[in-house]
């Protein structure tokens, strides 16, 4: 088992991301948004070639590697109604960059939920077709695409994830502990309840090869409130304990969301606070795992 994280939550600057990773004593980053020398933060598969070269140089010099691309491929901002060429272009940019960095895994999703449609009217056959092609292209390149339960079709509930797995041979999962806490369960009758992280994990765990750690609660005002790991409703301790008991030896990637939320521009903080928060989150995750191992 190894620890890594979305280091852009410490800072978009690649040098600061490396510094935070080294301070934790880790050697991996799950790369999402990066900037170099004040450039505009962009996803690692979208930044210009010259900036990507600089990112590679800094990583090589530091000894820190990218264990996973936190890509935007088929994510919550992409519609299944958009041309598939958008996705294919992202794949074609990602593959050579993964090869250069020696990265074997990339996070994908299954496109945004069509909010104006019923849960059973989500263009699922087209989603299945596209995911099969996405998986095939990465597999042909010797790479593994892992699907995250986020704001997408398969994140509508564990039954949807299992349906995706049934229709996309070879699909593997990255399970996010926090996303179910804040996601409605579309398999239930209205008013839709929020999902249970443990229930979701329990049904899909045989397909999980990677873990994202978020945690939090829905507060009294009905708003999302993120917490340190193990302090929210994400069943983090129970899930990690089960992983340890099952001999899990993959990655655990922190995604704090406490001081910087990737998809919510209204949540901002000073650079030093973001950095300190990321490092503290990582240390608490280490202590949580150590305590579970000791028990």
Image (tube, grey):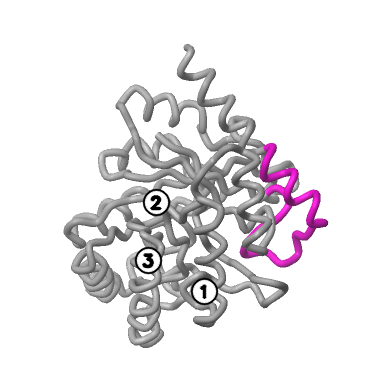
What residue do we see at 46% from left, 26% from top?
238
Quick check: marks 3 and 2 in contact, CB under 8 Å?
no
Task: Please report whichever mark, 3 or 2, sits nearer to the chain's N-terminal start.
Answer: 3
What numbered label is drawn on residue 157?
Answer: 2
For residue 62, side relative to residue 37 (left or right)? left
Residue 112 in sight in this render: no
The outermost residue toward the top is 295
Q: Nearer the viewer, residue 17 or 88?
A: 17
The residues tagged by marks 1 and 2 sit, at their Cα atoms, a distance apart of 36 Å
Q: Secondary structure at mark 1?
A: helix
Residue 62 in sight in this render: yes
Quick check: marks 1 and 3 in contact, CB under 8 Å?
no
Residue 64 at x, y percent in the picture: 51, 51
Identify residue for label 3.
98
Residue 181 at x, y percent in the picture: 54, 44
Residue 81 at x, y percent in the picture: 39, 83
Say if the magenta span includes residue 90. Answer: no
The magenta segment: 258-280
What residue do we see at 82% from left, 56% from top?
270
224 up-or-down from 232: above or below:
below
For residue 234, side relative to residue 123 (left or right)? right
For residue 23, side relative to residue 178 (left or right)? right
Q: Secondary structure at mark 3?
A: helix
Identify residue for label 1.
52
Quick check: marks 1 and 2 in contact, CB under 8 Å?
no
Q: Secondary structure at mark 2?
A: loop
* Snapshot quadrant of residue 214: top right
41 up-or-down from 1: above or below:
below
């Amino acid at each position: 088992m190894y620890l890594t994280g979305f280091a852009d939550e410490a800072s978009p600057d690649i040098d600061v991301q490396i510094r935070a990773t080294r301070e934790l004593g880790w050697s991996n980053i799950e790369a999402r948004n990066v900037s170099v020398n004040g450039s505009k933060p962009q996803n690692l598969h979208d930044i210009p070639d010259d900036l990507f070269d600089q990112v590679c140089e800094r990583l090589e010099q530091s000894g820190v590697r990218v264990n996973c691309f936190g890509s935007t491929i088929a994510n919550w901002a992409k519609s299944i109604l958009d041309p598939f060429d958008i996705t294919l272009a992202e794949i074609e940019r990602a593959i050579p960059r993964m090869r250069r960095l020696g990265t074997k895994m990339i996070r994908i999703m299954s496109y945004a939920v069509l909010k104006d449609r019923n849960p059973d009217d989500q263009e699922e056959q087209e989603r299945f077709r596209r995911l099969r092609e996405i998986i095939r292209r990465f597999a042909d390149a010797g790479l593994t695409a892992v699907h995250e339960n986020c704001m997408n079709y398969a994140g509508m509930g564990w039954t949807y994830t299992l349906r995706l797995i049934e229709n996309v041979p070879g699909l593997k999962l990255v399970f996010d502990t926090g996303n179910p806490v804040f996601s409605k369960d579309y398999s239930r009758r209205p008013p839709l309840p929020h999902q249970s992280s443990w229930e979701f994990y329990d049904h899909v765990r045989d397909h999980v090869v990677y873990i994202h750690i978020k945690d939090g609660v829905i507060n009294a005002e009905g708003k999302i409130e993120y917490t340190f790991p193990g302090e929210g409703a994400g069943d983090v301790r129970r899930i990690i304990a089960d992983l340890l008991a099952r001999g899990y030896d993959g990655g655990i990637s922190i995604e704090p969301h406490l001081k910087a939320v990737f998809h919510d521009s209204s949540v901002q903080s000073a650079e030093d606070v973001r950095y300190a928060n990321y490092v503290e989150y990582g240390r608490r995750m280490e202590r949580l795992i150590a305590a579970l191992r000791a028990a």
